[in-house]
Amino acid sequence: MMFQPQIGSKSRTYKYVDEQVLLASYPDMFVLPFMPFLLLLLARLTIAAAPTVSLPYGTFRGFESGDLTQFLGVPFAQAGRFENPRIPTHLHGIQNATEFGPACPQQSLTPQDVFYTGPTYLSISEDCLTLNIFKPKLLEGSKKLPVFVVICAGGFQLGNSRDVDVTPMLRRSIETKEPVIIVTPNYRVSAFGFLAGKEVAAAGISNLGLRDQIFALKWVQRHISEFGGDPSRVVIGGQSAGSMSLSFLAQYNKHDSHELFHGLVQQSGPAIHIPSLADGQADYDALMATNGCASAADTLDCLRGVPFESLMASVNKTSNFFSYRSLNLTWLPRIDGDVVQRDPFTSISQGLYAKVPVMSGMNDDEGTLFSYSTLNITSAEEFLDYVHFNLLPASSANEIQKLGRLYPQDPTQGSPFNTGAAYELTSQYKRISAFQGDLEITAPRRFFLEHASQTQNVWGWLNKRGKTASALGAYHGSDILIWFPPDLSRETSMGVDAIVNFINTLNPNVPAKHSSANIAIHWPRWNTVSEGGSKPVLTFFDSGINITAENFREEQVQFLNSLRLDEAGVSL
């Protein structure tokens, strides 16, 4: 028998063929007793409608948010402490992929609350090898989308897959009709990811953090098509340690990781000079001694059994990039003859790197952030000693003296650059800032571009925004707001548009329809000559965007690279 609702009165009337039935006080007397059942039914309907993807080792249920679909905390590997990553064991039932996975153990940094602006880590676990997939909710037919894999920053000491909000970029890609899929993986950091020493070499567990990244990229090749992604169109990007990681993965090694992607987006992270596994033996021995493992028959196995809290406490006592040693890191990738087969300067000079298009850039004042820990250096002699014994121990006394002349005490030549005598926190602060930024970012980046621009398409950029805001200037990491702004407008979208275009076409030049008239600009390749001069870079000023030439501090850069080449045993 069918009820037919009659609309128009306060109470709802239902009509049979020949009679009426009035359900008075309908909400209170009829609906409320069935509310638990209705809520359960609604929940089941919602679950049934949630996006689900089945992989060989498990089925994962994500969620929809507006025009996006997200799968969070999906395990891509599993590994015990100081073990190589491996395929996850089979997971029974449908797994909820609706929350970020835990961060890998993070090294504590003293000024973290001041300088590190990533999210608060709600949970930390050694079982942390998960990744996140962000995609458009609606895909056009069977078309597979290009993929952008973002490797997080953190100086190889901290950082995780939720550090950068990639959803504004994804929404912008949808808006401009150039949709992409974005993947953000975790990887192990600090001692958990970059332990060194002969015992590590013998166990074959060197550079675990890089091995995690390679495993994640292989996961993308195997499984991203299930999420609508095209494994033949993968671009990888990163900032700081994330970008340096890309540099190492792009070099030829025994894992052929350079074959797992088709373009690079590098923010302030070139292939720096790195030490060998053997050079980390003292740090390994110290960690064993602190944890009562020095006399064990198998020191590595002993360290695997140390309670997490005790091990973490001893790791936190080691130096970090905000300590006096600063960029002389304890935990970092090292030459192991496997994941990193040779010194990066050797690989680059011999052309042993992926021949793929590259976007590469830096901030104008890369060294300021890492020079706050050296404010107790107040004389020229102390400056030269710091440079020699902490950062360039293989250099001769004459070479150190020449560096002193190339980086004079004159604050008008220091960093923040182009700020005159302002921000001279000490007589050596701007001097140390200029030197450290060039040694670790400017010089090795330019060395790579000078080679890569002869073998593939390369675009360079430079951030000079915020020069007069503080003694940090355009500091390391400040470009995040250009490439990953929290909110997008016509004025802030050019950086995002450039990356989205690069992911889609391997060319960052943004069509005019995607940009407002005052920022649309053609971005020439780095090895061409433009109106701004040779080595043109897209330069971001507070007042706008323009093309300038990357010809600053040529003598300093060439000398620093010559020192690194000598250390690597390379003669050009």
Image: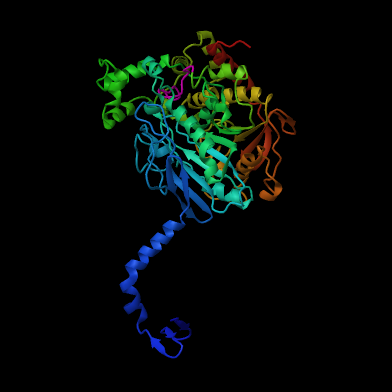
Residue 441 can be seen in this image: no
**How was this image coloured?**
rainbow
Residue positioned most to the front: 1
Q: Residue at 37% x, 28% y: name it.
A: 192
Which quarter of the figure is the C terminus placed in? Answer: top right
Left or right position of 402 against 390: right
Taking depth in this image into account, of 571 and 186 the one nearest to the observer is 186
Q: Position of residue 82 (x, y in %)?
A: 36, 26
Taking depth in this image into account, of 164 and 89 the one nearest to the observer is 89
Left or right position of 458 against 487: right
In reply to whether residue 448 is colored magenta, the answer given is no
Which quarter of the figure is the N terminus placed in? Answer: bottom left
Give the vertical position of 178 relative to 85 (above or below): below
Residue positioned most to the bottom: 18
* Magenta span dominant secondary structure: loop
Q: Position of residue 454 (x, y in %)?
A: 69, 24
Q: Specify the segment rendered in magenta.
A: 325-337
Q: Position of residue 357 (x, y in %)?
A: 64, 32
